[in-house]
Structure formats: C-alpha cells, structure tokens
Image: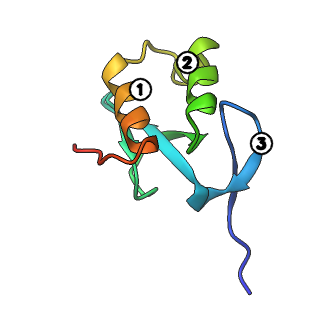
Amino acid sequence: MRRLPQRTCTGCNSKKDKKDLIRIVKNQNGEIKVDLTGKMEGRGVYICKKEECLNKAIKNKRIAKTFETEIDESVYEAVRKFINGGEIIG
C-alpha cells in the first residue's frame, strides 16, 4: 500500500494527509489562488478544512509571511466559503 503524502496545516501546525487539506498557491506571477487539485505550479501553503485554523492563520499572518506578500481578503473569503460547503470559482 502506498503512503499518502503528509503536509502541515499552517493554522494549527498538525500533520495531516495532503488530500485532507486545502492548498493555497502563489505562482510565478505573484497571483495567489486556492488550489483544489493540488497540482498548480508554485509555492503552496496548506490549511485544514476548519474555520478555526483559517482564523488562526489570518490572525498570525502565517500565509502572508510564507508568501512574503499581503494576501487579498478575497482569497480568505474563498477558503472560508469552501470550508462552509460552498464552491470556489476561479
């Protein structure tokens, strides 16, 4: 049986299977997007599918520090909408 890749949630710092996390990507052009496929090119940050983890990451600016840039509020809202059962468009 193949081992599943493990990633660390940037909110709660716990290790989980990659498929159980949401990936946020910064590509070469500096665009920051939510990557549901896990295959987009660029630097990735992973976060649990829990609103508490997202809020902790926002409060401590962990995603912004990793990407070394300010994160647009629309990215956080897209993740929050997905966590609450919505769809991410774009």
Q: Residues within 10 Å of mark 2 (few under 14, many from 20)?
A: some
Q: Quadrant of residue 27?
A: top left
Q: Are marks 3 and 1 in contact (CB under 8 Å)?
A: no
Q: Are marks 2 and 3 in contact (CB under 8 Å)?
A: no
Residue 76 tag number = 1
Q: CA distance from mark 1 to mark 2?
A: 8 Å
| The disc label shown at residue 58, or none | 2
- Does the image show residue 26? no
Q: CA distance from mark 3 to mark 1?
A: 20 Å
In the rendered structure, which amino acid carries the disc numbered 3?
Ser
| Residue 70 percent coordinates (x, y) | 43, 12
Is the residue 6 above or below the residue 76 in the image?
A: below
Q: Closest to the observer: 34 or 88?
A: 88
- In the image, residue 82 above or below residue 74: below
Name the mark on residue 14: 3
Residue at position x 57%, y 22% in the image: 55
Q: Secondary structure at mark 3?
A: loop
Q: Which sits earlier in the primary sequence, circle 1 or circle 2? A: 2
For marks 3 and 1 on the same chain, the one whose residue lies earlier in the sequence:
3
Identity of the amino acid at label 2? Answer: Ile
* Left or right side of 7 for 67: left
Q: Amino acid at mark 1?
A: Tyr
